[in-house]
Amino acid sequence: MCKISLSRRNKEILIAVCSFTILIILYKLSGKSRSVSNAKEFSQTDSIHTKEETLTKTAYRIQELEEKISILEKQIPKTYPDVRYLNYLARKRILVTGGAGFVGSHLVDKLMKEGHEVIVADNFFTGRKLNVEHWIGHENFEMIHHDIVNPLYIEVDEIYHLASPASPPHYMENPVKTIKTNTIGTINILGLARRVNAKVLIASTSEVYGDPDIHPQPETYWGHVNPIGPRACYDEGKRISETLTYAYAKQEKMQVRVARIFNTYGPRMHMNDGRVVSNFILQALKGEIITIYGSGGQTRSFQYVTDLVEGLVSLMNSNYTLPVNLGNPVEHTINEFAAIIKELVGGNSKIVHSSEVEDDPQRRKPDITRAKKYLNWEPKVNLNVGLQKTVSYFREELRKFSHSQRNKFVPV
Ligand SMILES: NC(=O)c1ccc[n+]([C@@H]2O[C@H](COP(=O)([O-])OP(=O)(O)OC[C@H]3O[C@@H](n4cnc5c(N)ncnc54)[C@H](O)[C@@H]3O)[C@@H](O)[C@H]2O)c1
């Protein structure tokens, strides 16, 4: 139905453009023939007068047609990715805080495609409209410019609470705001969930384990966090966020879920987030030196964003209420990782080591026994496949950037 009306509109535009072109040609021809046949009859002044009149009429007609084209263009309906139809009983109204961010926008894609109504609340601190641009205008989608440090009053069935800066340069930029987002913001979201009796999932992090002294980290491990270090605003912020969640659950008998998310990568991740994946890909794509902080023997496990999104939705739909690690247990040293990215991108970037970063965790690997047992979940996307998609995204972002640089107006 949508396709038929689209092609009809396109036809209308095509007809308008054709008639506009024909009109110009006719005017030009008539101008020429008239000037030849009537040359003897009209004086030079008359001829100039007629041409001026013709030009004015043509300009007027062109303006009319341009207006018509722009009206028709506005009527062309936007096309959206395919969305399942869910009836009233099956369709849920879901709030995703931080839904314009990296993980949030992929979660929105999944929930929208499943046929739910999705409301995004975001203050665009690190998120951007472009990440959810393909849904804007869809009848099941709504975006609210909102800072969750302020209360939000809406009616929803489920809440995925993701709003929080996630990468060190972002959360360290304004540590007090990071703490407010994870404390006051979480209280506001839990309060909203309590008021409307919604199920709520809190996006926590592997950072609650700090610099772990057991390996891999099961959910039963209490962590090893420096409460006054540079990362404390985030680590302790997320820890209190979890504490608040279980306090509300116990006191208010609410349905809560807590996901402890490990390092995630994929398209739409921030190019300047200072994390290993983005740093290395960007440096390799630009042919710059690939910098490893410290010896490079420290490990990270990386999960592809669609795997994480599957895990978040499975957790929300499960009956499991304790924290669940969501991450990829396949461990790589930073050195190995630099080599893989260099290989994937190609080019002549050199790999060099620089001084260690303060409080940088040495080893990080999730124990996902719980997720396997209770959610039947484990990551599926192969590292090379995921990295290739991420490299393509970064390459395209760099291309767009250099294109806009060329077209930028620089005042003299
Ligand atoms: N990406 C990862 O590797 C990772 C790892 C562990 C945990 N997490 C958690 O997952 C969640 C999403 O992370 P991400 O990687 O998508 O980060 P992101 O920075 O891309 O997204 C966070 C979103 O929250 C929004 N936001 C921040 N403060 C807000 C506020 N006060 N009010 C409203 N919106 C606000 C941002 O604008 C952004 O859109 C975060 O809670 C993060 O702590 C992510």
Image (spheres, rainbow, N blue to C red):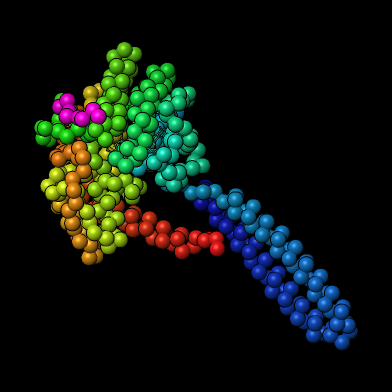
Coordinates of residue 123 in the picture (x, y in percent):
44, 36
Relative side of 5 to 101, left or right: right
Q: Is residue 283 left or right of residue 52?
A: left
Apparent side of residue 1 relative to residue 31 in the rendered image (left or right): left
In the rendering, at what x and y percent does residue 96 appear?
39, 33
**Residue at the far bottom in the pictured view:** 40
Q: Quadrant of the C terminus?
A: bottom right
From this view, report whether residue 391 is shown above or below residue 151: below
Return the x and y of residue 18 as percentages of the image width and height: 64, 66
x and y percent of residue 289 in the render?
24, 59
**260 to 391, vertically: above or below:** above
Magenta span: 221-228
Q: Is residue 85 among what the camera can see?
A: no
Give the vertical position of 160 relative to 381 (above or below).
above
Determine if the magenta segment contains residue 93.
no
The residue drawn where x is 57% and y is 51% is: 76
Name the image quarter holding residue 60. bottom right
Q: Residue furthest top?
A: 251
